[in-house]
Image: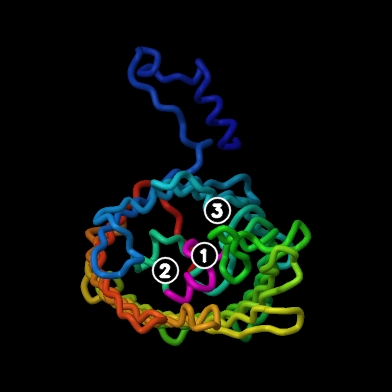
Amino acid sequence: MDHKILALLLLTPAGFSAAQQSGAPQQSSNLLNPNISVVGNIGMSWGDDATIGENLFSFKEAEVAFQSVVDPYARADVFVAVSEEGVELEEGYITWLSLPGGISAKAGKFRSNLGKFNRTHPPETFFVDRPLAGEAFLGEEGLAGVGASLSWLVPTSALYLNVDLELTDSFGESPSFAYEEDGELLSGGGRRDLGYLVRASTFYDLSEASNIAGGFSFARGVHDREGELATNLYNADVTFRWKNPRRAVYRSLTWQTELLVAQVEASPGAAVTSWGMFSYVDYQFQRRWHAGARFDRTEFPADNSTNEQGGLAYITYTPSEFSLLSFQNRVVRRADGATDWAQFIKLTFNIGPHGAHPF
């Protein structure tokens, strides 16, 4: 019998248990409800860096996730960010998992598949901030849009190869694909000026304990009000992972590097090129302890106004997989030659069955 029909029968008077009929506390079945989870992100910050704000404490956001199977062929995921600034839909999409030819499809609002780091929500990253290059090119919240995507697992025995195609109405308020008006970044172009993205990624097992993943992404969209000037954005990423399966809960290592290159048209046919990168290492040296470091650099836009480079180091204590406490220290050399220092404490907690992010 279909489980949904069975659940409805159990909720009818004929299906009540003796305890329910006697007035005992009742709880309806969860079979028809989505999985609901919350990730809280609390921070402390101090130092001489003017970008960290004036308050010592901040509740950055609570990310509420609703995730469920729609039917045997599709699932839905909705992520809502609640912060002091208001409520915002981060992502909300449906995914068809098993289309013919090894294809899956997605429609709704989603984070663009540009590199690896962009798809991870801020509370789930190792860091209290976004890398300098990621924020300069893609914005504080990353590259996202409303549209549709196709993902194809190429049928080849030689290697793992996946190809993604995305078509969105725009890339949101990303600095690479927007224009500034009254101090705000607005999406470039009009209704017909869409955002295009293609990504090819691969994965290879180096040994029983290590693997390497890599990808190349290309995105194109307009960045001016009239839709006459376009930006080509390139991204290359590589991730190395090591985890001994015999001692997996005690030792692990992740090393990820991304390179971004933007070609922004200043006039039709004449583009200005700028680049940025970040690289980080996370090492788990005990069951509940991680240490890591990050280096990043950005030259976007290519006018020396944001020619910055910096580093971040952290140590993180994880009592369990549902919470962490991280102390982080960051230094940034600004475009004007000044050096800013900042210290942070990041506390996150997770309640509910929060689904894993893409591997």
Residue at the (65%, 73%) spot, across then down? 219
x then y, percent, for residue 55: 27, 55
> Which numbered tag is attached to residue 222?
none
Q: Is residue 218 above or below residue 107?
A: below
Verify CB contact (< 8 Å) between mark 1 and mark 2.
yes
Q: Is residue 161 magenta?
A: no
Q: Marks 3 and 1, how far apart in space?
A: 12 Å
Say which of marks 3 and 1 sits in front: 1
Among all residues in the image, which is located at the extreme right? 192
For mark 1, what is the residue?
142
Residue at the (62%, 65%) spot, across then down? 179
Q: Secondary structure at mark 2?
A: loop
* Residue 195 placement, left or right of 39: right
321 vs 167, nearest the viewer:
167
Residue at the (61%, 52%) spot, across then down? 93
Q: Quadrant of residue 235?
A: bottom right
Q: Secondary structure at mark 3?
A: strand
x then y, percent, for residue 270: 72, 84
Residue type marked 3 = Glu
Using the rendered image of the protein, determine whether residue 257 is visible from the camera's viewpoint.
Answer: no
For mark 3, what is the residue?
91
N-term mark: 1 or 2 = 2
For mark 2, what is the residue?
130
Q: Marks 2 and 3, how far apart in space?
A: 18 Å
Residue type marked 2 = Arg
273 vs 126, nearest the viewer:
273
Q: Which residues are magenta?
A: 132-144
The total number of labels drawn is 3
